[in-house]
Image (cartoon, grey):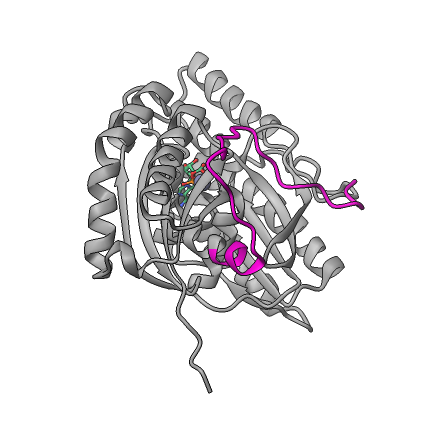
Amino acid sequence: MKEKKDIRILAFESSCDETSTAVVKNGSEIESLIVATQIKSHARFGGVVPEVASRHHIEVITQITREALEEAKVSWEDLDAIAVTHGPGLVGALLIGINAAKAASMATGLPLIGVDHIMGHISAAQLVEPIEYPALALQVSGGHTEIVLLKDPTHFEIVGDTRDDAAGEAYDKIGRVLGVNYPAGKTIDQWAHQGKDTFGFPRAMIDEDNYDFSFSGLKSAFINTCHHADQLGQELDKYDLAASFQAAVVDVLAEKTMWAIRQYQPKTFIMGGGVAANLGLRERMNNEIAALEKAPKVILPPLKLCGDNAAMIGAAAYNQYLAGNFADLTLDADPSMELPYAEDYK
Ligand code: KG4
Ligand code: ZN
């Protein structure tokens, strides 16, 4: 029997503040992964500055392309396709990766694949274990908070979404009030483990008959509590504040996601995005799912695959490769790209 040929993809990710390249084999095996982070350059501004991001991407992209090939011990001839995130994200940042990928594709003649950043985050799971379909994903990052139904490897639909702020955005905003540098999620998570839920912040939309979220009310309640105490000259315990905020976020995320799991009965449950690194959320989801009578397989990618990285783009690109979904040199950045909403989205 003829042996199946390995498919090796060089992937680029530059949608926000990490420039990343990777070589991924068969959509599941990371042969190399390089991540050049710019966090320090943006921290002093309290968020990502688009112009600064683009400039950093340009500075490192050629170098980290070389490094990805070297680390994987492959040359251009060993590759089968070039993949790149083309949205959603910062337009100027996306364009750097897209142009690098197009140049590589044009110079080598290798096919080009455009990847949705959110599909990439979710597909990071297949770098850990094979995904069985249908699957359900909780995608939580600085820009997105969505429950996504994976019908098959290339058809993903939103069944729940945030009506306002993303969960990570809320972490970063309340972090600023507590004097924590951007991105604040990890520190707030650590503080939360040292405090107690004493403030009883609101759990918005938790009883509503849909899978949507809202975090702006929680953020305002948090900020008002801090300002009010400030005016009275009271000092609030930062650990209890963090614990109370996190308990409210985790409660709504877990509650709604569990409803969706009961409704859609997925074979696999996945968490993706930067907030999926949250230890409180991981623990809660693991426990709740373990208590189900018919529990799906759970894939919580390791922390380094939760943040933005090109390996997840290589994984998602492999699925597109098998489906024959290739781009051409007209591939453009789509900063506000969105997955389709499910037909029964409420
Ligand atoms: O997916 P990601 O790296 O970039 C986006 O596409 O947004 O997510 C970054 C977000 C930031 O808002 C950061 O504060 C948050 O993920 N984050 C966390 C944790 N680690 C990172 N939020 C809560 N708990 C964490 N442990
Ligand atoms: Zn991301």
Q: In this view, does 129 lie above or below 140?
A: below
Task: Give residue 51's position: percent from left, percent from top.
Answer: 34, 19
Q: Can residue 201 be seen in this view?
A: yes
Q: How many marks?
A: 0
Q: Does the magenta stretch include residue 320?
A: yes
Q: Quadrant of ligand 1?
A: top left
Q: Can residue 237 be seen in this view?
A: no
State yes or no: residue 339 in magenta.
yes
Q: Is residue 74 above or below residue 118?
A: below
Residues rendered magenta in the picture: 318-346
Q: In this view, does 225 lie to the left or right of 66?
A: right
- Please tell me in which quadrant of the rendered image residue 296 appears: bottom right
Please name whichever residue, 330 or 128, is drawn nearer the observer in this view of the structure: 330
Q: Where is residue 283 in the image (x, y as percent from the top left)?
A: 49, 58
Q: Is residue 290 left or right of residue 283?
A: right
Residue located at (52% from left, 44% from top): 118
Residue in the picture at 60% in, 62% down: 288
Name the quarter where the C terminus is drawn. Answer: top right
